[in-house]
Amino acid sequence: MTRETLIGQIRSKKTFLCVGLDPDTEKLPKKLIEEEEDPIYEFNRQIIDATAPYCVAFKPNTAFYEAYGLNGINNLDKTFRYIRANYPDHFIIADAKRGDIGNTSTRYAKAFFKKFNADAITVAPYMGHDSVKPFLEFEDKWTIVLGLTSNAGSADFQQLMVGDKELYLEVIEKCAQWGTPDNMMFVVGATKAPMLEKIRKSIPRHFLLVPGIGEQGGSLEEVCRYGMNSDVGLLVNSSRGILYASAGEDFSERAGEEAKKIADKMAYFL
Amino acid sequence: MTRETLIGQIRSKKTFLCVGLDPDTEKLPKKLIEEEEDPIYEFNRQIIDATAPYCVAFKPNTAFYEAYGLNGINNLDKTFRYIRANYPDHFIIADAKRGDIGNTSTRYAKAFFKKFNADAITVAPYMGHDSVKPFLEFEDKWTIVLGLTSNAGSADFQQLMVGDKELYLEVIEKCAQWGTPDNMMFVVGATKAPMLEKIRKSIPRHFLLVPGIGEQGGSLEEVCRYGMNSDVGLLVNSSRGILYASAGEDFSERAGEEAKKIADKMAYFL
């Protein structure tokens, strides 16, 4: 998907919500577990249908599928296919946080861009340019580099000073030279909203993928204040707050309501 | 596998070779591609049989399986099972370079330690303590943190100065506080052998997983000189140099010979 198409979707739907598809069998409605042959896929399918009107992107985190072995990967594959077939205008992010030496990163890129047909993949920057650049070689596909993550551990390395700036800013500025605002985004946690201001100054045009609103404590208002640019420039993710709004039979209905609530706020900030 | 068992294996077999199982269908013998229903698995099986006498560890890199979609993951699963069933004394490393926020890292740990029954997984440190620690919660399992990688891109961030030391040393020293020499190792590229001296001084007891000898240009002699400790403390990986020693029908025989050559040198350094 091109940048123009993505921005067009955000403008026309008045939402920049990304729904994280992180299925956890311990939290899935009992009825699904008991009655469905493939409860994870059925859960995803119903969540996707219920939230699609209120979001522009879906983001399956690969860990939640790999944990269930081959069956989990099969569910991931089916989920990608379901979105692509039924919601072709939605942006699909494989939240995989991959990264390896050059020829190996190319294989991850092929796995997610070709086999799974995702629009974007999240990438860990620690191994440097030859681990990141292979993902940039695919037309109309996006590399979303971890910049400043939403977890407490971001203080351990990302926030250390490297010369006169924090490592996360060094990572963002260096990676921004390898890609363009048309094929690269950065993960910036909502829990670090004030630091968004500094990041936004440094990369005025890039889209930011922002996890951490809701359960992790980040504020949508702060994210918009510090992170929005003239093209919106934000994809804000919510996973648990939407997926597990209810563990009853009304889970998809409640998920849709939660997604709508966030989208309504987003429309206000737009 | 415990540290004592691993050291015992190295001492008794007089080798600390790890064979990287990175199957690439473009390099596989044509005969396998044409005649075998499952050429990747058949390739791995024959490589494993041929090299097992000369190595103590096998290391499938997950990218080389994910690139082939569900079939690739199925091959990875079968490869893990084959090693476990036939070579129960070999140490199995899932070279996955995973890392995510806490509850998500736990899922990756379950995927590789429980579903695939690997002994170890490689982990990317950028997200800090709550992304690394979940891997340490599994008994007799190992977390192998990326310290200083063998690729050119290691200069981009890993070798930047953070205060009075390089980031890679800060990563290694901080992570070493989260685990112990009994459940944590570090990846240190063979192409950076002189920096090994500094790393070895900083963490005298930890095992190091060393990729980059052979095709990438690292020297086994330098790795031993700077990296070996009184418990050996090294697992040195070779992938392409062994796997693709021949593209003919003698591929496994030649792979065995290459592995034996390296093991003979290792025996000398031991």
Image (spheres, coloured by chain):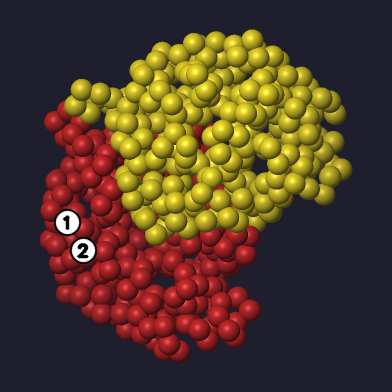
Chain colours: A red, B yellow
Horizontal and vertical percent for residue A257?
A: 32, 84
Quadrant (top left/top right/bottom left/bottom right) for the N terminus of chain A: bottom left
x 32%, y 46%: residue: B129
**Do labels 1 and 2 touch, CB within 8 Å?**
yes
Q: Is residue B235 above or below residue B112?
A: above
Give neighbour class at mark 2: few <14, some 14-19, many 20+ (Cα, 10 Å): some
The one nearer the camera, A125 or B21, is B21
Q: As shown in the figure, which amino acid type bears the numbered disc 2?
A: Gly
Residue B30: x %, y % from top left: 81, 35
Q: Residue at x 25, y 52 (%)?
A: A152
Question: What amino acid is found at the position of numbered circle 1 in the picture?
Answer: Ala
The residue located at (65%, 29%) in the rendering is B9
Above or below, comparing residue B12 to residue B49 in the picture: above
Please state, as top left, top right, bottom left or bottom right, where the C terminus of chain A lies in the image: bottom left
Is B75 situated left or right of B38 in this image? left
Give the percent coordinates (x, y) of residue B98. 46, 46
Query: Which of the labelled discs sits on residue A218, or is there none?
Result: 2
Asked if badge 1 and badge 2 are on a common chain, one would say yes
Q: Is residue B163 above or below residue B217?
A: below
Asked if residue A3 can be seen in this view, the reply is: yes
Residue A193 numbered tag:
1
**Residue at left 18%, top 34%?**
A161
Front in this rendered view, residue A207 or A194 = A194
The local secondary structure at tag 2 comes to loop
